[in-house]
C-alpha cells in the first residue's frame, strides 16, 4: 500500500468525518478541514490515538483566501496533496418561491464555488506530478428532480458538469476525477424529525465512506467516473 495525503473538506461531521476515518484506517494520511475547529481536533486526536497521522485546519470553502492558505499549509506539512475529496456542503429544503437570494448564495458558494476553489488549488500540482485524484460528493439530486431542492440540485448538477468537463482536460495527465451521487444518508444535514422518521431507511455515512474508499482503491489504469448510491427502498 502506498500511503497518500488525502484532503477531505467538510470533515467535521457526517459523511466527511466517516470518509476521514475510513481512509485513515486504510493507512493514509488524512487532512480534515471545516469551519468548526473543536470537532476537527477531536477527530485528529482519535486518529492519532490509533497511531496514525492526521491534521486539521480550519477552512471555509466560501473564502478563496481560506482555501488558498489551507492548500499551502497542507503542502508545506506533507509535500503534496494526492487526493482531494470535495465533501463540504449545505442544503436548503425550501420551495423555489420560499428560497431567498442569501439561501441561493450560501448553497451555490459552498457546494459549487467552494469545490471549484479547492480544485483550483490542487490541480496545478497534480498536473505537474502527473497524478492525483479528485472525488466529489454530489447527490442523487444532481440527476433526479425533487421538490424543495431546486437550488441544492443546481449546485450539485453544476459540479457534476464542471467535473465531467475537467476530467476530459486532465485525463492526459493521469488525473482521476470521480463523482459520487449518494441518496438519503443519516447525517446532521437532515433535521432530527426526518432522521428519526426515516432512520431505518436511510444509508449510514459509513456506507458512503466505504464506497468512497473503493472508488479510490482502483488499479492505476482504472477510473470509476460516477457512482450512484441509493437506499434499497429508494429516495425519501
Ligand atoms: N446526508 C445526505 O442525505 C446526503 C445525500 C447526498 C449528498 N450529501 C452530501 O454529502 C456532503 C456531506 O454532507 P453530510 O450529509 O455529511 O452533512 P453534514 O453532517 O451537515 O456535513 C456537512 C459538512 O460540510 C461542512 N461545511 C459546510 N459549510 C462549509 C463551509 N463553508 N466551509 C467548509 N466546510 C463547510 C460542515 O462543517 P462546518 O460546519 O464545521 O464547516 C460539515 O462538516 C454534502 O456535500 C452533502 O450535500 C448528503
Image: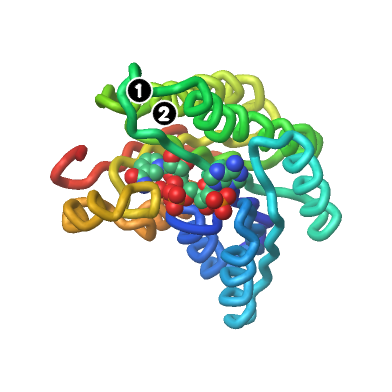
Q: Label 2 belongs to which residue?
A: 152
What's the coloring here? rainbow
In the rendered image, residue 51, in percent from the top left (x then y), is placed at 63, 81
Image: 211 above or below 160: below
Give residue 97's quadrant in the image. top left
Percent from the top left, x then y, of residue 183?
A: 30, 41
Q: Which residue is mark 1?
A: 98
Number of numbered discs visible in the structure rendering? 2
* Quarter occupied by the C terminus: top left
Q: In this rendered view, identify the residue nearer to me: 122 or 71.
A: 71
Drawn side of residue 207 relative to residue 156, left or right: left
Residue count near mark 2 (Cα–Cα under 10 Å), binned few <14, some 14–19, many ≥20: many
Residue at mark 2: C-beta within 8 A of ligand 1: yes
Specify whether 55 is left or right of 217. right
Near-viewer residue (202 or 106): 106
Q: Position of residue 122 (x, y in %)?
A: 73, 38
Taking the image as drawn, is residue 85 in sight?
Answer: no
* Image quadrant where one finds the N terminus: bottom right
Q: Residue at left 60%, top 34%?
A: 115
**Residue closer to the observer: 227 or 31:** 31
User: At numbered mark 1, what does the secondary structure look like: helix, strand or loop?
Assistant: loop
Q: Is residue 122 left or right of residue 148?
A: right
Which numbered tag is attached to residue 127? none
* Residue shown at 52% from the left, 70% from the top: 25
Say which of marks 2 and 1 sits in front: 1
Residue 49, horizontal then vertical, whole percent: 60, 82
- Taking depth in this image into account, of 207 and 132 the one nearest to the observer is 207
Residue at image position (65%, 61%) is 37
Q: Residue furthest left?
A: 233
CB within 8 Å, label 2 to label 1: no
Amino acid at each position: 500500500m502506498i500511503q497518500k495525503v488525502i484532503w477531505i473538506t467538510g470533515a467535521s461531521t457526517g459523511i466527511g468525518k466517516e470518509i476521514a476515518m475510513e481512509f485513515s484506517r486504510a493507512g493514509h494520511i488524512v487532512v480534515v478541514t471545516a469551519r468548526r475547529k473543536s470537532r476537527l481536533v477531536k477527530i485528529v486526536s482519535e486518529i492519532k490515538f490509533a497511531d496514525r497521522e492526521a491534521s486539521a485546519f480550519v477552512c471555509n470553502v466560501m473564502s478563496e483566501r481560506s482555501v488558498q492558505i489551507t492548500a499551502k499549509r497542507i503542502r508545506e506539512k506533507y509535500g503534496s496533496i494526492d487526493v482531494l475529496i470535495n465533501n463540504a456542503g449545505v442544503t436548503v429544503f425550501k420551495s423555489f418561491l420560499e428560497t431567498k437570494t442569501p439561501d441561493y448564495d450560501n448553497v451555490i458558494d459552498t457546494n459549487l464555488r467552494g469545490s471549484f476553489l479547492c480544485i483550483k488549488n490542487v490541480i496545478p500540482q497534480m498536473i505537474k506530478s502527473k497524478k492525483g485524484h479528485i472525488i466529489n460528493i454530489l447527490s442523487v439530486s444532481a440527476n433526479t428532480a425533487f421538490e424543495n431542492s431546486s437550488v441544492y440540485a443546481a449546485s450539485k448538477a453544476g459540479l457534476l458538469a464542471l467535473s465531467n468537463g475537467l476530467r476530459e482536460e486532465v485525463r492526459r495527465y493521469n488525473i482521476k476525477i470521480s463523482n459520487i451521487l449518494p441518496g438519503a444518508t443519516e447525517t446532521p444535514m437532515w433535521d432530527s424529525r426526518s432522521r428519526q422518521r426515516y432512520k431505518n431507511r436511510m444509508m449510514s455515512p459509513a456506507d458512503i465512506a466505504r464506497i468512497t474508499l473503493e472508488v479510490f482503491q482502483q488499479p492505476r489504469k482504472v477510473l470509476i467516473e460516477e457512482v450512484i448510491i441509493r437506499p434499497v427502498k429508494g429516495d425519501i
